[in-house]
Image (tube, rainbow, N blue to C red):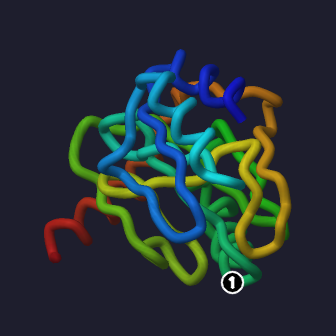
């Protein structure tokens, strides 16, 4: 877990360690000493990335059968370009895109049933954490963490920005 944290911090990503009951965005840091201490204090902690502008990421989360169906529709429409991906088990995953430099909201089902967005104010679990629902050990499809360079599709960004403005 510490090796994974070091690799992510080298990318400039603010991380935190979350137990099954606590830990959060306020604790996100790029200081490896704090992460090392947290890993020592939290048994079976989850390594988490603060998404949004601080890490330069917008994550589209595919969750469950409904998410797979919705993602298939979005992909067929060309709205989910290839990008850095984390497998979360059960067919789901995280698609990491480059943050556009403007506010992007986080929320459940923002792009349809089972397709959530983790961006400004959000977070995701990182490998080698285990999925809380199915015990699957998260995995990078590339085998290692890497900063996403693929931008969000303009129609996806526009839809998310419209939702943020309406809120």
- Residue located 48% across and 72% down the image: 111
User: Residue 116 location in percent, x, y?
Assistant: 51, 69
Figure quadrant of the C terminus: bottom left
User: Residue 65 location in percent, x, y?
Assistant: 76, 81
User: Residue 105 location in percent, x, y?
Assistant: 30, 61
Pointer 1 residue: 66
The front one of 137 and 80 is 137
In terms of secondary structure, where does tag 1 sit?
helix
Relative to 51, is 5 above or below? above
- Residue located 44% across and 47% down the image: 58
* Local crowd size for mark 1, using a 10 Å CA cut-off: few (<14), some (14–19), many (≥20): some
Relative to 41, is 32 above or below? above
Horizontally, residue 61 falls left or right of residue 128, namely left
The front one of 139 and 3 is 3
Number of marks drawn: 1
Q: Quadrant of residue 91?
A: bottom right
Horizontally, residue 107 falls left or right of residue 41, namely left
Figure quadrant of the N terminus: top right
The front one of 162 and 97 is 97
Horizontally, residue 47 falls left or right of residue 89, namely left
Q: Quadrant of residue 84?
A: top right
Relative to 67, is 75 above or below? above
- Residue located 72% across and 50% down the image: 129
């Amino acid at each position: 877990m510490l090796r994974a944290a070091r690799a992510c911090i080298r990318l400039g990503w603010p991380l935190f360690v979350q137990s099954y009951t606590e830990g959060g965005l306020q604790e996100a840091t790029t200081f490896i000493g704090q992460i090392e201490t947290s890993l020592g204090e939290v048994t079976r902690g989850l390594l988490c990335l603060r998404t949004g502008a601080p890490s330069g990421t917008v994550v589209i989360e595919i969750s469950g059968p409904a998410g797979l169906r919705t993602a298939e529709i979005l992909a067929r429409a060309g709205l989910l370009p290839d990008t850095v991906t984390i497998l979360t088990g059960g067919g789901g995953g995280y698609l990491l895109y480059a943050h556009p430099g403007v506010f992007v909201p986080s929320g459940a089902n923002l792009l349809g049933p089972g397709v959530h967005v983790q961006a400004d104010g959000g977070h995701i679990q990182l490998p080698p954490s285990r999925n809380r629902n199915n015990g699957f050990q998260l995995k990078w499809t590339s085998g290692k963490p890497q900063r996403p360079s693929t931008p969000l599709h303009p129609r996806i960004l526009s839809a998310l920005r419209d939702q943020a403005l309406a809120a």
